Image (tube, grey):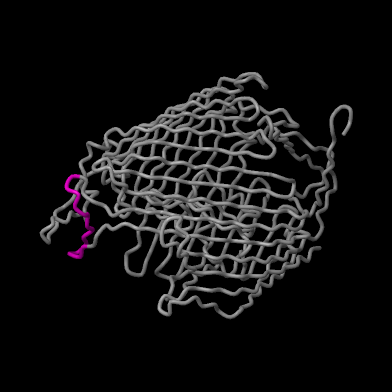
Amino acid sequence: MEDWGYALEVKIPFKSIRFPESADQEWGLHVFRKIQRTGFDESWAPVTKDVANRLTLSGSLSGLRDLERGLFLELNPVLTGTRQGTYDAGAKAFAREPVSGEFGFNAKYGLTSNLTLDGTYNPDFSQVEADAGQIAVNERFALFYEEKRPFFLEGTEIFTMPKNLVYTRSIINPVAGAKLSGKAGSFQLGYLGAVDEVGDSGEPARRPVVNLLRARRDLGSASTLGMVYTDRTTSGDEYNRVFGFDGRFVMARRYTLTVIGAGSRTATPDDAPEAGSYLSLQFERASPTLTFNLDLEDVAHGFDAGSGLIPRVGDTRLQSRLEYNFRGEPGALVEQFRPGFDASFFWDHESFWRREVFEEAEVRYGVTTSFRNNITVLLAATARRYDFRAADYDGLFVDDGRGGEVPFVADQDPFGLLHGVGGFFWVNSWDVLRGRVRWGYSQDAVFDLRYGVPIEVGTGWDADIAMYAYPSRHLSAELGLRYQNLVRQSDGTLALEALIPRIKTQYQFNRALFLRAIVEYGAQMRHGLVDPVTGRPLLSCRSGDCSLRSGSDANDFGIETLLSYEPTPGTVFFVGYSRQMEDTGRLRFRDVRPTADGLFAKVSYRFRR
């Protein structure tokens, strides 16, 4: 600390960073300081929101000469011991397998000062924190889960795209993998290959080979042009391949046009190969005051991103957002006041190109207010509309009560205008306790999750609450709660309900040693679908075979603990235990039955030169 402020000294080995091979170099550098109490950021180099690409505003480190990275090689052997347990329903007993051991190996080699090769064999991710539960009782499409596994995080930034044509979580259980990442001239390169191991219980495991290739070239100081290729092959007649291009073009410093185009080809042993196309256009304006974006995404019915995550296949989406930021003085009661409007419209892919009316729409108007001391409040109102075709209900029938079935098509008039209100509250100014609350009360459709069509209108609440507590410099805790319900408007009965409380605590003994515990309870219930007019059960009928569109009820309870000792990166010792259980009723805890558990110990050492 000095009279004029403070100074920081940071030592970063050249082996830990990438840089071009040239005698004289000038590096761009951004240094930001986030002030938690006020919510403001301080920057070493002047920045402005008038510019779409902040990297062009970085400061400079000049006078760098004759830099040598030297030989960069890391070897990281890993030993893991596990003991798994599962509940045997036939024997009505919990059985544990013998202790088993696994050997794994990781390696990293610097081909050049700016290009690195990584490899892994039999990687183990036992220490990775389990995903927080997400509510899926009325969700028609696949959910997104963040990547947390180290091998798929380090050096894979190039695979990050505005749309998820690459989604490494699609590699479920890698047996071995390799990746190449870095930069050569104006080209940034990335390759990721893996042998995956997938298979349902009781079936022989399959080992598809995954190859992901990405290249991107700088155009000037802010624009880029790139390509992507993904290949997931299980056998000669079972594969998925995607090839695409993307461009990001910055105009007049504040306007950005992003273009993505791709095509896929998918083959399975029982069907002929199927092809499909993907198109995304996005136009944005960056500004301290007026911002807007316009986004068009068109996904053909045959498109399949087998190594990505494109949830809505066969749909076309048009989305826009407009927001104006009224800025107050720092420290004023109201530091920012941002009214905003956004709208989303969805068509069936073919209906869009035939210029037909959209089948889904959502419009939202909200006002976000940021108060001093890092307190933010959002209030919003929404309106939704669904208008599906009768053909979308093909396969759904109503039990007529006389041993027969009649076709079911929901009346679309009740879905013509569904209202909702919601809000968000965020407090981040205190050292000991921080938190956020998101809530909503709205009308929405109760969906058939197999057919993806609305059945009837429901009204209900949804909430997402998170609290972060730091009672001491060593102890931290995260408390979360997610909730959703829908009550049928036709008869006032409960259609679905979900409740997911979660507690995560961590005690940091010192820089290298911590103990973590996670407890999560997931209660998700959904009643069977009925005709909102007659109250009779709905059936799904295919080729003369009918089955009830019955509900589900799951009350899962999980505990996860980890003791971690990591004196240096790559040199670790982990001990962990997890246990999965089922409750016979929501939050009863009277007859909690174990379904699986696991104990593991892991040790690794990093050799580096």
Residue 539 is a magenta residue: yes
Q: Give how far across and how far down residue 300 sits, in percent.
A: 35, 49
- Furthest residue to the front? 590
Q: In the image, 167: left or right of 446?
A: right
Labels in figure, total: 0
Task: Give the vertical position of 334 relative to 224 (above or below).
Answer: above
Q: Give how far across and how far down residue 472 sits, in percent.
A: 73, 45
Task: Give the vertical position of 124 relative to 158 (above or below).
Answer: below
Residue 107 is a magenta residue: no
Q: In the image, 150: left or right of 43?
A: left
Q: Tell me the residue at 43%/27% (across/down).
A: 365
- Furthest residue to the right? 3
Q: Give how far across and how far down residue 535 sits, in percent.
A: 20, 49
Query: Foreground: 205 or 102?
Result: 102
Query: Foreground: 174 or 491?
Result: 491
Provide the residue span drawn in magenta. 533-546
Name the quadrant containing residue 120: bottom right
The N terminus lies in quadrant: top right
Query: Foreground: 41 or 38?
Result: 38
Task: Give the vertical position of 554 relative to 101 (above or below).
Answer: above
The C terminus lies in quadrant: bottom right
Task: Give the vertical position of 374 relative to 457 (above or below).
Answer: above
Q: Tell me the residue at 53%/49% (across/down).
A: 227
Q: Give how far across and how far down residue 59 sits, in percent.
A: 75, 33
Name the quadrant containing residue 111: bottom right
